[in-house]
Image: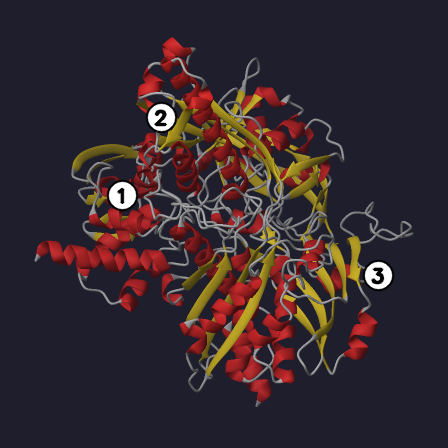
């Protein structure tokens, strides 16, 4: 099989890679680009652990082919914030103890960022439905939802 | 613990030390490690639930370009029936080996038969298709009724039921039968004014960790081999893998990666021995990762169960007798937690007359693994449903009936000891006084309440605290951190040393950097490993005082340790931890403290949950509209993570009660092996889960800690189940209360 050359932008960095036509974007991110912050939980688009943005749209990277990243802008957890400069959502997840094992956390943070970009003032119900594609088995979602609502409030305060 | 201890760090809601790595994607989980030259392993799995393997020929696959090595059962050195520690119980190594790679027979759909390592996953998957297997398909045994019949097809021709005075004449699928009894149940039921007797059924469910099993390994012929994997117990992975491969323990280093959920399911081995064989035969590092459907089909579900429960009570509310007969599916190999079901079922009650009969039964399904309070939720579901019905029939409030009969200090358990101080009464009182319980139900809503008991364990933990020349330190522990335990270790060490949290970095050491630690399970980590941390920190303090004394030329008993500094009580002077550590070179070398414990006295943690549901009478869909989880933590080290355990357990229990079940077809093929069809609770399925932390100190821990990880999954089954029955006016006896089942109950009621 011949590999395909792809030019894309990942977290604002221009990036080139070679991939098989059948490789998923998730495989490329994790195995070829060593961006292992994006996790694989199911490979079938059911768990949301691999959530990334593609041209600003929230997607499961296990359902996107690597070649579809050609000319696109990809956003992953690695682009959300740095350890010494956390994004508000990341801070609120820590403050609210909204993670236990942490495997779903990168996907949830990417999804929350997409939620709040679309809807800066979600109701609890809106947040719960938007994040229904991100499975968490540890927390029962209570502290996650609190972190999301607090993030929204804080971010609204910041832009005012 | 007569007076409340004053704490500086314990009880605060600190930021967990591993948090930044986890919110930025830097934390490395099982599938995140790659090594130079690494190849990929995949597994051939059985298409049949029950079959003899007549022929297994891997030669065509081995000849394929890009294939590097092949593994089958024949690559395992001869394994015996010797018991080895695996998870929360022992498993015999022959069964473990035959579960890892089938020998002679496949015993469930998805049972591993052979594995291939190749340069890419695609090549490995292609090569699997070239393995020739001939099967003689046998009738699968798919449930307890079928398995327990006298003429049932046998999974193991050489298995005779254990637990009878004499070995039965014929082999059976019933691996073991046990009895637990105290008092005289016949006399107890004769005294009763009301008796409730019902049958209950619970389904096969999966732990549902989001991270699939995965590992990266490197075999080293001359020196030390390495396994990197996601596990709750890397020392147990070492023991099991070394046993199956006949390696000395010292030749195998196991590194516990960050773990993406386990809940008991990551306490045994599936991939690790196979990957190591593939690595040995290819000379290359090997990575393996299960697909989600492999996780469902071939890793640790929890037992499906059938039980009959009978409870009797007097008009004044005294429960006079409690009895149950319990059968649990073990999956393909013996070893379900049926007896634990018997031990836990009625322990929330101070009832003198108890009888439990338990059966451990093999069926053609994956071998069960521990799942949060393994064995307790199924049995306590039946017991709590029956007690709630008894309360209703006696016309007594269900909390009051439980309070009147509550187990407390001195209550005799059916499994042996009398309970020490426990907090069930306090949990029930908290439930009764909660805003939730005082909320009146509207038309169409139902309420359920249930208690849960789990023993908790202690066991062996070893911790080293290595101090650095600048006065900071590293806490090296051996308990994989599955839910934030590094935060509590850091807090306990800071509490003893009196230095800031961030000066102490907790890490999970690999199997060669720290002595043996039991796995993270049994709600033991904060309790037992916490005790080892406290002991290690006290050891450091002791040495710091000695060093300060030598610098001041006084005796150590003239030095006091206060708020992270040594105080010279014989003269003037104060030295901080950092100042003493900076001078270690002059006072005898560097400082490290150790704590090696085999912790006894784990205090049971009782839980009480209240659940309100609303049922759509047209579709049978159940919504949980209000939920409160109350539990005794002894002393909550980090309240947020204690609440998180309550909420996580509640959510898993709600899933068990409402949606989750393995659906099999007649051939024994699981039809819903994915998160779309095996539906764990979503954010949109649940309300906020209110929590109340009760603190009745465990006097066997320096701070009063009780493990909190497990009890929370027990009460939801009956709290939800009874609530649904209350809402629709029918008796719920079978879980899950999924829409079709609830609709049937509604229709039958008419």
Q: Nearer the viewer, residue B101 or B654?
A: B654
Mark 3 element type: loop
Q: Nearer the viewer, residue B591 or B14?
A: B591
State the image coordinates of residue B537 (x, y, percent, origin top left): 45, 30
State the image coordinates of residue B505 (x, y, percent, origin top left): 37, 31
A4 in relation to B66, above or below:
below
Q: Which residue is mark 1?
A: A77
Quarter in which the N terminus of chain A is drawn: top left
Distance (Cα) linking label 2 and label 3: 76 Å
Q: Nearer the viewer, mark 2 or mark 3?
A: 2
Q: Nearer the viewer, mark 2 or mark 1?
A: 2
Q: Which residue is mark 2?
A: B567
Q: Earlier in the sequence, mark 2 or mark 3?
A: 3
Picture quadrant where residue B671 is located: bottom right
B231 in relation to B572, above or below:
below
Q: Which mark is residue B675?
A: none
Q: Numbered disc 2: what chain?
A: B
Mark 1 element type: helix
Mark 2 element type: strand
Q: Which mark is residue B150?
A: 3
Q: Numbered disc 1: what chain?
A: A
Q: Nearer the viewer, mark 1 or mark 3?
A: 1
Q: Numbered disc 3: what chain?
A: B
Circle 3 packing at 10 Å, graded few (<14), some (14-19), many (20+), is few
Q: Are marks 1 and 3 in contact (CB under 8 Å)?
A: no
């Amino acid at each position: 099989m011949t590999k395909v050359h792809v030019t894309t932008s990942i977290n604002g960095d221009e990036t080139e890679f070679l991939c098989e036509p059948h490789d998923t974007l998730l495989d490329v991110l994790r195995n070829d680009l060593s961006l292992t912050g994006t996790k694989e939980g199911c490979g079938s688009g059911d768990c949301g652990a691999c959530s990334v943005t593609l041209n600003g749209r929230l997607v499961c990277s296990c359902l996107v082919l690597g070649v579809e990243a050609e000319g696109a802008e990809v956003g992953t957890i690695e682009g959300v914030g740095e350890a010494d400069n956390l994004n508000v959502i990341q801070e609120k997840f820590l403050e609210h103890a909204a993670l236990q094992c942490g495997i779903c956390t990168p996907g949830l943070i990417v999804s929350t960022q997409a939620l709040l970009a679309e809807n800066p003032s979600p109701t609890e119900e809106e947040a719960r439905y938007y994040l229904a594609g991100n499975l968490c088995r540890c927390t029962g979602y209570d502290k996650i939802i609190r972190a999301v609502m607090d993030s929204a409030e804080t971010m609204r305060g910041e832009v005012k | 613990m007569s007076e409340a201890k004053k704490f500086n760090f314990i009880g605060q809601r600190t930021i967990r030390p591993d948090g930044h790595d986890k919110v930025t994607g830097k934390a490395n989980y099982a599938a995140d490690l790659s090594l130079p030259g690494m190849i990929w392993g995949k597994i051939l799995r059985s298409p049949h639930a029950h079959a003899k393997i007549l022929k297994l020929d891997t030669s065509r696959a081995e000849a394929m370009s890009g294939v590097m090595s092949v593994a089958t059962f024949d690559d395992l050195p001869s394994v015996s029936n010797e018991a080895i520690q695996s998870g929360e119980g022992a498993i015999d190594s022959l069964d473990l080996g035959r579960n890892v790679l089938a020998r002679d027979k496949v015993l469930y759909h998805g049972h591993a038969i052979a594995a291939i390592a190749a340069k890419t996953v695609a090549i490995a998957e292609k090569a699997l298709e070239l393995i020739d297997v001939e099967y003689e398909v046998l009738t699968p045994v798919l449930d307890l009724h079928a398995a327990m019949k006298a003429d049932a097809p046998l999974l193991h021709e050489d298995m005779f039921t254990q637990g009878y005075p004499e070995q039965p004449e014929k082999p059976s699928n019933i691996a073991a039968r046990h009895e637990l009894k105290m008092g005289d149940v016949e006399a107890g039921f004769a005294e009763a004014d009301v008796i409730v007797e019902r049958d209950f059924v619970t389904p096969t469910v999966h732990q549902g960790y989001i991270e699939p099993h995965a590992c990266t390994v490197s075999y080293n012929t001359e020196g030390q081999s390495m396994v990197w994997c996601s596990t709750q117990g890397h020392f147990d992975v070492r023991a099991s893998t070394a046993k199956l491969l006949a390696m000395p323990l010292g030749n195998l280093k196991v590194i516990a990666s960050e773990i993406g959920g386990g809940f008991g399911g990551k306490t045994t081995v599936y991939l690790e021995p196979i990957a190591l064989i593939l690595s040995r035969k290819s000379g290359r590092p090997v990575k393996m990762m299960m697909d989600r459907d492999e996780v469902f089909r071939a890793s640790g579900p929890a037992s499906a169960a059938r039980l009959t429960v009978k409870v009797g009570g007097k008009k004044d509310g005294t429960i006079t007798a409690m009895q149950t007969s319990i059968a649990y599916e073990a999956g393909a190999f013996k070893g379900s937690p049926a007896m634990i079901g018997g031990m836990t079922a009625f322990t929330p009650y101070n009832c003198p007359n108890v009888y439990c009969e338990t059966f451990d039964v093999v069926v053609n399904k994956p071998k069960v693994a521990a799942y949060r309070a393994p064995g307790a939720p199924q049995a306590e579901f039946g017991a709590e449903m029956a007690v709630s019905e008894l309360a209703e029939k006696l016309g007594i409030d269900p909390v009051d009936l439980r309070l009147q009969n509550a187990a407390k200090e001195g209550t005799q358990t059916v499994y042996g000891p009398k309970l020490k101080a426990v907090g069930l009464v306090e949990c029930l009182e908290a439930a009764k006084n909660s805003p939730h319980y005082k909320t009146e139900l509207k038309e169409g809503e139902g309420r359920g309440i249930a208690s849960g008991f789990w023993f908790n364990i202690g066991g062996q933990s070893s911790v080293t605290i290595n101090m650095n020349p600048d006065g900071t330190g590293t806490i090296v522990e051996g308990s994989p951190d599955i839910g934030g335990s590094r935060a509590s270790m850091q807090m306990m060490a800071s509490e003893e040393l009196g230095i800031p949290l961030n000066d102490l970095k907790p890490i999970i050491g690999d199997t060669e950097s720290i002595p043996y630690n039991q796995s993270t399970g049994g709600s033991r980590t904060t309790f037992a490993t916490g005790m080892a941390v406290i002991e290690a920190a006290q050891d450091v303090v002791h040495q710091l005082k000695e060093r300060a004394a030598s610098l001041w030329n006084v005796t150590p008993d003239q030095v006091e340790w206060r708020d992270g500094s040594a105080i010279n009580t014989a003269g003037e002077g104060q030295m901080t931890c950092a100042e003493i550590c900076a001078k270690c070179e002059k006072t005898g070398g560097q400082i490290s403290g150790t704590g090696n414990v085999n912790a006894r006295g784990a205090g049971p943690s009782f839980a009480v949950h209240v659940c309100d549901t609303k049922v759509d009478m047209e579709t049978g869909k159940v919504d949980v509209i209000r939920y409160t989880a109350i539990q005794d933590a002894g002393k909550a080290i980090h309240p947020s993570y204690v609440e998180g355990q309550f909420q996580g357990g509640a959510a898993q229990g709600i899933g068990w009660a409402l949606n989750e079940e393995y659906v099999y077809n007649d051939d024994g093929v699981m039809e819903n092996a994915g998160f779309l069809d095996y539906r764990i609770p979503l954010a949109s399925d649940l309300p906020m889960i209110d929590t109340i932390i009760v603190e009745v100190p465990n006097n066997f821990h320096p701070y009063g800690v009780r493990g909190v990880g497990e009890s929370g999954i027990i009460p939801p089954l009956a709290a939800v189940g009874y609530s649904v029955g209350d809402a629709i006016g029918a008796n719920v006896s079978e879980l899950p209360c999924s829409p079709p089942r609830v609709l049937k109950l509604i229709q039958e009621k008419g």
